[in-house]
Image (tube, coloured by chain):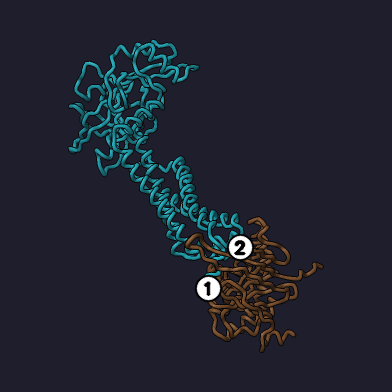
Chain colours: A brown, B cyan
């Protein structure tokens, strides 16, 4: 059995700027941020504070300007570009604000994409994605195209896509922003119950304070820095349910 | 991921069909125009190709192509016959009198006077009648297209009469001679009679047709004849290419066809390239998501190439089918007989369209390769 690393995510002094000279914009200013395995961590803050840039850096989609990022003990910036893609494919799952489902694929096919990308046979990949969609309550919508699904259903398909290959870190960007309150609550419940495992961590970037009670920790960002982190917010129904 | 690529390609039916249509239309135009062009060029030497009994054509050194001849001296025939390696050599007359029918129809005609004794120089495929009847006095053999031009709408029938230069002659055979460059009737007659269908000149022998003995190639014989007589000698193949070369250099045909072929190429490249590029741009978000999920650049390039090649193949197949249908329909018409879809054209256009879709996909590939996967986080 593989030992669970002490930290799922460790960001130390992470800086990121875009552009040079007069056009230089400093987005991250020495961010220190950690997430433990089994944690559902929220990253909150005003628009433009650097939340999305930080999760992009954590996910290896952007390079840092300075500082280091370690995922499960692996410094991802030391990996070659090719290996970083492979690391991301194996270890990360994504849930996007706009779902980003492929409109030409059915729900089951969309959820199977990470497995297909990993080289799994189409039939095997679809079997696994269908099984997961059943768990997420979409057994009757598996052959529907995204255009025929509601926002909540699309986000559940996106969640299935993020979970299907059993990644160790799931990164969610405003997963409830395009949903009404009840649907957002349902999606967060699914995320919390399906994604959070002892060896797996989840980072959620959100503005939506109606779902803060799902968080184990909330990191508050402002102007490119983590200003403070609060553990187990009061009235955390999720934490209470899991404690 | 191949099926994902193909689903992405065909998801928007209108765009997919637009892309296919652009490639199909371009393929059709390119195959159509290049084949017609080659067919017309081949017609410039079709009467040379119809002569199967001789391999070498001897002519005045100033002769550039089949239609324009300067008469040889009668002694030239004997000089050619005297060249070592000549199996036999016979004379050939070529003239262009006007043929008139009793009903009053008339047309300029290409009259070929073939050797009286051997009938060397005559096309062999007869639709009606026999070559032997050419030995009858005042007899001619005419091609089917010429017959229908002089006797429009009437069935093929032997022993009808035609008048040329006050000579009334009888049709004793109808051939399936290859179509000439201009749509003139092709009339074969014995040499001694054909020379009378035009106003008499001192010398009327246009060509000497020769065949080498066994062991001497036509190329070697042409060299020997030129060395021995000072006349110009060409093999059948060389003379056909001389005619093609003449028309390429002295007519506007290549320019006209070149413009159409160029337009077809531009349509293929620009329209299909632009459509495919826009298709990629509109799917950029999807490619970004795939990149974020962990699809490698290598795999994405493969997906784009698969999409481009699939669109190219389907468009090419459709365009080739259209072109083949076009030529099949028009091969049944007398005026366009012999003009077919050339395999060389089909292969050439396939290579060209392959390059077009590869060029079209290169821009798309570049766009996807430089795409930051982090863009998927921007709403």
Q: Is residue B279 left or right of residue A217?
A: left
Say whether mark 2 and mark 1 are on the same chain: yes
Please tell me the numbered disc located at residue A48: 1
Query: Callout 2: residue from which chain?
Result: A
- Note whether residue A211 is visible: yes
Which quadrant does the N terminus of chain B fall into? bottom right
Hey, which quadrant is residue B118 in on the image?
A: top left
Q: Is residue B345 left or right of residue B108?
A: right
Q: Disc 2 marks which residue? A: A64
Query: Callout 1: residue from which chain?
Result: A
Task: Please tell me which residue is depicted at 50% across the width and 17% down the height of the picture.
Answer: B215
Graded by Cα atoms within 10 Å as few (under 14), some (14 to 19) or many (20 or more), the crowding at tag 1 reads: few
Q: Where residue B258 appears, x then y in whole percent?
A: 35, 42
Task: Please tell me which residue is depicted at 43% across the width and 53% down the height of the picture.
Answer: B24
Hey, which quadrant is residue B275 in on the image?
A: bottom left
Q: Where residue B132 appears, x then y in whole percent?
A: 35, 26
Q: CA distance from mark 1 to mark 2?
A: 17 Å
Using the image, determine if residue B103 lies above or below residue B302.
Answer: above
Using the image, determine if residue A171 lies above or below residue B168.
Answer: below
Give SS at disc 1.
loop
Hey, which quadrant is residue B237 in on the image?
A: top left
Give SS at disc 2.
loop
Q: Where residue B283 appears, x then y in whole percent?
A: 50, 64
Q: Where residue A104 appears, x then y in whole percent?
A: 53, 67
Q: Earlier in the sequence, mark 1 or mark 2?
A: 1
Using the image, determine if residue A50 lies above or below residue A137.
Answer: above
Task: Please tell me which residue is depicted at 80% across the width and 68% down the height of the picture.
Answer: A3
In this rendered view, identify the residue nearer to me: B222 or B15: B15
In this rendered view, identify the residue nearer to me: A95 or A134: A95
């Amino acid at each position: 059995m593989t030992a669970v690393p002490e930290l799922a995510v460790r960001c130390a002094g992470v800086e990121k700027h875009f552009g040079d000279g007069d056009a230089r914009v400093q987005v991250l200013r020495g961010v220190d941020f950690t997430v433990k395995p089994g944690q559902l961590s929220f990253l909150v803050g005003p628009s433009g504070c650097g939340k999305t840039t930080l999760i992009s850096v954590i996910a290896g989609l952007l390079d840092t300007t300075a500082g280091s990022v370690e995922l499960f003990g692996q410094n991802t910036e030391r990996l070659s570009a090719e290996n970083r893609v492979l690391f991301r494919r194996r270890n990360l799952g994504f849930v996007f604000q706009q779902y980003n489902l492929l409109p030409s694929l059915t729900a089951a096919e969309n959820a199977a994409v990470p497995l297909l990308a990993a080289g799994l046979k189409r039939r095997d990949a679809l079997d696994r994605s269908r099984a997961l969609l059943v768990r997420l309550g979409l057994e009757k919508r598996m052959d529907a195209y995204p255009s025929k699904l509601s926002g909540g259903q699309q986000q559940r398909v996106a969640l299935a896509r993020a979970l299907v290959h059993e990644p160790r870190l799931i990164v969610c960007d405003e997963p409830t922003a395009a949903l009404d309150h009840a649907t957002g609550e349902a999606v967060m419940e699914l995320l919390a119950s399906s994604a959070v495992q002892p060896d797996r961590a989840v980072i959620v970037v959100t503005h939506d304070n109606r779902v803060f009670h799902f968080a184990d920790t909330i990191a508050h960002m402002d102007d490119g820095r983590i200003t403070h982190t609060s553990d187990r917010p009061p009235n955390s129904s999720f934490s209470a349910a899991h404690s | 991921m191949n099926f994902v690529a193909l689903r992405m390609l065909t998801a928007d039916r209108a765009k997919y069909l637009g892309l296919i249509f652009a490639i199909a239309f371009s393929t059709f135009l390119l195959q159509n125009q290049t084949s017609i062009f080659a067919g017309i060029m081949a017609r410039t030497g079709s009467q040379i190709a119809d002569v199967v009994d001789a391999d070498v054509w001897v002519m005045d050194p100033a002769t550039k192509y089949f239609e324009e001849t300067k008469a040889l001296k009668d002694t030239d025939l004997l000089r050619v016959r005297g060249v070592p390696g000549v199996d036999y050599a016979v004379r050939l007359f070529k003239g262009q009198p006007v043929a008139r029918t009793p009903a009053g129809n008339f047309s300029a005609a290409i009259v070929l006077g073939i050797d009286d004794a051997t009938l060397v120089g005559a096309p062999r495929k007869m639709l009606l009648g026999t070559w032997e009847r050419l030995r009858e006095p005042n007899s001619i053999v005419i091609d089917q297209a010429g017959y229908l031009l002089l006797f429009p709408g009437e069935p093929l029938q032997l022993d009808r009469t035609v008048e040329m230069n006050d000579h009334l002659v009888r049709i004793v055979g109808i051939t399936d001679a290859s179509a000439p460059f201009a749509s003139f009737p092709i009339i074969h007659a014995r040499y001694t009679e054909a020379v009378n269908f035009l106003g008499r000149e001192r010398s009327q022998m246009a060509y000497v047709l020769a065949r080498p003995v066994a062991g001497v190639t036509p190329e070697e014989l042409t060299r020997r004849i030129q060395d021995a007589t000072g006349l110009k000698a060409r093999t059948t193949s060389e003379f056909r290419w001389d005619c093609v070369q003449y028309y390429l250099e002295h007519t506007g045909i290549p320019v006209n066809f070149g413009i159409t072929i160029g337009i077809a190429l531009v349509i293929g490249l620009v329209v299909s390239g632009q459509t495919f590029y826009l298709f990629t741009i509109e799917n950029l978000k999807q490619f970004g998501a795939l990149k974020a999920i962990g699809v490698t650049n290598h795999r994405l390039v493969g997906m784009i190439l698969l999409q481009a090649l699939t669109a190219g193949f389907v468009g090419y197949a459709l365009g080739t089918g259209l072109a083949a249908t076009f030529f099949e329909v028009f091969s049944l018409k007398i005026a366009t007989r012999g003009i077919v879809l050339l395999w060389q054209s089909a292969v050439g256009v396939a290579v060209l369209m392959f390059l077009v879709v590869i060029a079209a996909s290169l821009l798309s590939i570049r766009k996807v390769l430089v795409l930051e996967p982090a863009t998927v986080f921007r709403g």
